[in-house]
């Protein structure tokens, strides 16, 4: 990726990981996407696109569409979390622009599975699975368990699927550890 940071997949839901591509670095929001290649790398790492996926869009279009979709999803997640009435027209328009169909795929032996494919190679088609993940999150997730990290310098989202539902940090290794170190230092003074 063009930025100094690799994408973090710690939200336990793809749509929230998509939102987490803007993160706080030294107190300032940093967009991890600076090019079409950054978005393509994220989609590939998320398992939502294949490496070397054929591209048929103008330079910068995937980046622009991904950022637009990300902000739509961010607004809807914030509305839902605040208990407000959702205004899903933008996401619905995005979803309506993505033709998709289901096909059977043969597995090993006699096993088969139904897979959804997105014919076409436009930027919008490539982002179709993300838009569907967001719609699924908004319609089906328990929003009592959708949280933001409690560390004051972090705003990453996550889906708290822990047994006790007491997850506080985007990651114990990142923010949880920073909080422990800060608490320890405060106790030492």
Image (tube, rainbow, N blue to C red):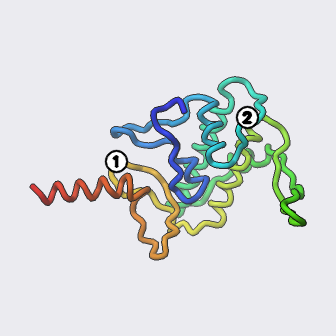
Furthest residue toward front = 109
| Residue bearing mark 1 | 153
Question: For residue 55, what is the image quadrant?
Answer: top right
Point out which mark residue 52 bears: 2
**In what quadrant of the picture does the N terminus appear?**
top right
| Residue at (60, 66) in percent of width and height | 141
| Left or right of 105 on screen, residue 149 | left
Q: Residues within 10 Å of mark 1 (few under 14, many from 20)?
A: some
Q: CA distance from mark 1 to mark 2?
A: 36 Å
Between 50 and 125, the residue placed more toward the observer is 50
Where is residue 128 drawn, in percent x and y? Answer: 73, 46
| Left or right of 171 on screen, residue 121 | right
118 in relation to 81, above or below? above
Between 53 and 98, the residue placed more toward the observer is 53
Where is residue 81 drawn, in percent x and y? Answer: 51, 61
180 in relation to 98, above or below? below
């Amino acid at each position: 990726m063009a930025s100094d940071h690799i994408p973090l997949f710690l939200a336990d839901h793809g749509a929230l990981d998509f939102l987490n591509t803007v993160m706080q670095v030294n107190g300032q929001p940093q967009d991890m996407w600076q090019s079409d290649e950054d978005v393509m790398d994220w989609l590939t790492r998320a398992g939502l696109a294949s490496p070397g996926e054929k591209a048929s869009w103008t330079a910068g279009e995937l980046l622009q569409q991904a950022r637009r979709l990300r902000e739509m999803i961010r607004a809807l997640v914030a509305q839902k979390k605040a208990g407000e009435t959702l205004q899903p027209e933008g996401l619905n328009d995005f979803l309506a622009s993505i033709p998709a169909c289901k096909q059977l795929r043969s597995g090993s032996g006699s096993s088969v599975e139904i897979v959804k494919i997105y014919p076409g190679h436009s930027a919008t088609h490539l982002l179709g699975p993300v838009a569907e993940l967001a719609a699924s999150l908004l319609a089906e997730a328990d929003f009592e368990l959708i949280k933001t990290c409690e560390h004051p310098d972090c705003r990453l989202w996550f889906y708290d699927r822990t047994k006790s539902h007491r997850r506080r940090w985007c990651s114990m290794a990142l923010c949880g550890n920073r909080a422990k170190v800060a608490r320890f230092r405060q106790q030492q003074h």
